[in-house]
Amino acid sequence: MSSDSNSDNNPNKDKPTLPGTSSSPPPSYPPPVREKGYWKMSDDEYYTTYRNASAAWYLLPIFFAIIGGIIMWLALRNEDPRKAKKGLIVGIIMMALGFVFWFLVFAAIGASAPATPTYTYYPT
């Protein structure tokens, strides 16, 4: 049999090939605008691309811990992603500090309580 008969039996003969599956080199596209990622940008590059959000946003995670951090991240994730991520981290840290604080408070209360309760019985 000839090679022509093998290509006639190929069921994928009429199907188009996917881009990048052919042996030809891929087409060259212009590089993306944010090629480096916002953490690797210098401050000048970053603030020409993104808006500098107010530092007052940090009050949310400071007072409301993780909930405030999530709200800050949702509000700033497209405008100022660095500040949004830092706000989420501040919220997590504030939540952890709250857990440590309340653990120490309850440990101090438990340590100051007597080991066995002392009741004084007054007969009536």
Image (tube, rainbow, N blue to C red):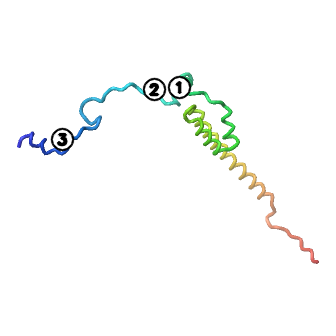
Q: Which residue is mark 3?
A: 13
Q: Residue at x 11, y 43 (%)?
A: 6
Name the image quarter holding residue 111. Answer: bottom right
Quadrant containing the N terminus is: top left
Left or right: residue 81 versus residue 102 is left
Q: Are marks 1 and 3 in contact (CB under 8 Å)?
A: no
Name the image quarter holding residue 44. Answer: top right
Q: Are marks 3 and 2 in contact (CB under 8 Å)?
A: no
Left or right: residue 93 versus residue 7 is right
Q: Amino acid at mark 3?
A: Lys
Outermost residue, left side: 1
Q: Which residue is mark 1?
A: 49
- Estimate the x, y position of residue 120 in percent, counting from the top left: 89, 71
Secondary structure under badge 2? Answer: loop
Q: Amino acid at mark 2?
A: Val
Badge nearest the viewer, 3 or 2: 3
- Estimate the x, y position of residue 109 in percent, counting from the top left: 78, 56
Q: Amino acid at mark 1?
A: Thr
Q: Which residue is mark 2?
A: 33
Secondary structure under badge 1? Answer: helix
Left or right: residue 83 versus residue 32 is right
Q: CA distance from mark 2 to mark 1?
A: 9 Å
Secondary structure under badge 3? Answer: loop
